[in-house]
Amino acid sequence: MTDPGRHDAEGLLRSLAPQVLGVLVRRFGDFGACEDSLQEALLAASVHWGADGIPDNPRGWLLQTATRRYTDLVRSEQARRRREEQAAREPPPGAVPANDDTLVLLFLCCHPALTPASQVALTLRAVGGLSTAEIARAYLVPEATMAQRISRAKQRLQASGASFAMPARDSSEWPSRLRSVLHVLYLVFNEGYTATAGPRLHRVELSAEAIRLTRELHRTLPGEGEVSALLALMLLTDARRPARTGSDGELVPLAEQDRTRWDRRLIAEGTGLLDRTMGDGRPGEYRLQAAIAALHDRALRAEDTEWSQILALYDLLERLTGNPVVTLNKAVALAMTEGPAASLDLLATLDGEGRLADHHRLRAVRAHLLDMAGDAEAALAGYREAAALTTSLPERRYLLARAARCRAKTRP
């Protein structure tokens, strides 16, 4: 039987972790040592709170325990005696600072000195409160590999001299730093919504964490249009998740989903956010993607989808980003407005695109268009190629099922 108290404690720890880490880093300055101390405190809390219940002041308990762990760490290393004395002079941690440094921490984890993969891992660990083992399971890598990635990221942050402070919003670096944060949140959500590998289509813990962090970012930066648009995009997309899988976990494509299962509350919230960004300057990539998602969500039936508007938005998005994945999605919209022949011509322009060379989606979309065009034999080969390339079991089963349909069409 699942213990509801345990899940309450886990959720509380996850929300408190970045707040306490922010206090520690602001107080002591050493991100790596502070993060290690917090992880030990979280482990202690999961044991003690499970046995004794959640304390009256959980944030203070966690901060006090993490501070003690930090002091122990400093004491064990003679080279850090100065920090030990500083820690000893700190006032008792019972008076917990009221400020929440979660946003500062998020920007630090997305520092440009780190690779995108390291930014994602460090954000999930330090801001999302996920353990190294949880992150490793989510990305299907050994725990030791993920631990090494996180350790290198902390070392690189320390070596870069990154300060624990928000970049000034009128500084030249603000736009690029904000883009990095949004990109990391977008990557985390996408991995949760469509897992790149493994037996499940969704990793709800990742998509839920991305939405939670984006809500926090939007709460702090309500006037940033792309922040609002990214949150809208996540909500509008996640609203369709209940209908994306069948009873056995099989993938259900958008055109075949039971739209009565879509979450209308999330759709209303997402469209409301999107509507409030309209007229707010030149639309960015997340606003355009959110607008596309909204057009899909507003269609009560697949045949009601306004494909011409979606195609126009993909045109804008393609010019803005130059992303071949956008062109791939645009090809589907083009097929729905002008037929599969025009779309196949568009896909031919992606054959030399390195980023899609070994990607199953290019083969899957081409197979779908060939099937629409009546070439079942070529579509069969395409679906099989796509199935061989994907590492997601639900996607592989779906593609092989499509291949079986095409094979049935080729039989006399």
Image: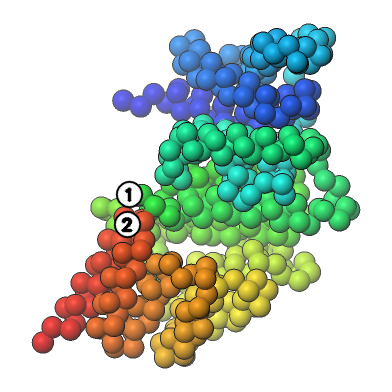
Asked whether, in this view, residue 279 is left or right of residue 320, the answer is right
Q: Which mark is residue 199?
A: 1
Local crowd at mark 1 within 10 Å, few (<14), some, or many (≥20)? Answer: some
The amino acid at mark 1 is Pro
Q: Residue furthest left?
A: 412
* Residue 272: x %, y % from top left: 64, 60
Q: Which mark is residue 394?
A: 2
**Marks 2 and 1: CB-CB under 8 Å?**
yes
**Nearest the camera: 223 or 168?**
168
Q: Quadrant of the N terminus?
A: top left
Earlier residue among tags 2 and 1: 1
**284 is higher (above) or lower (below) than 83:** below
**120 is higher (above) or lower (below) than 33:** below
The amino acid at mark 2 is Pro
Q: Residue furthest front?
A: 79
**323 is higher (above) or lower (below) than 308:** above
Name the quadrant containing residue 90: top right
**Spatial distance from mark 2 to mark 1, Cα to Cα?**
6 Å
Determine the secondary structure under disc 2: helix
Residue 332 shows up from this direction: yes
Determine the secondary structure under disc 1: loop
* Residue 107: x %, y % from top left: 72, 44
Name the quadrant containing residue 344: bottom left
Colour mode of the rendering = rainbow
At x 78% / y 27%, what residue is drawn? 29
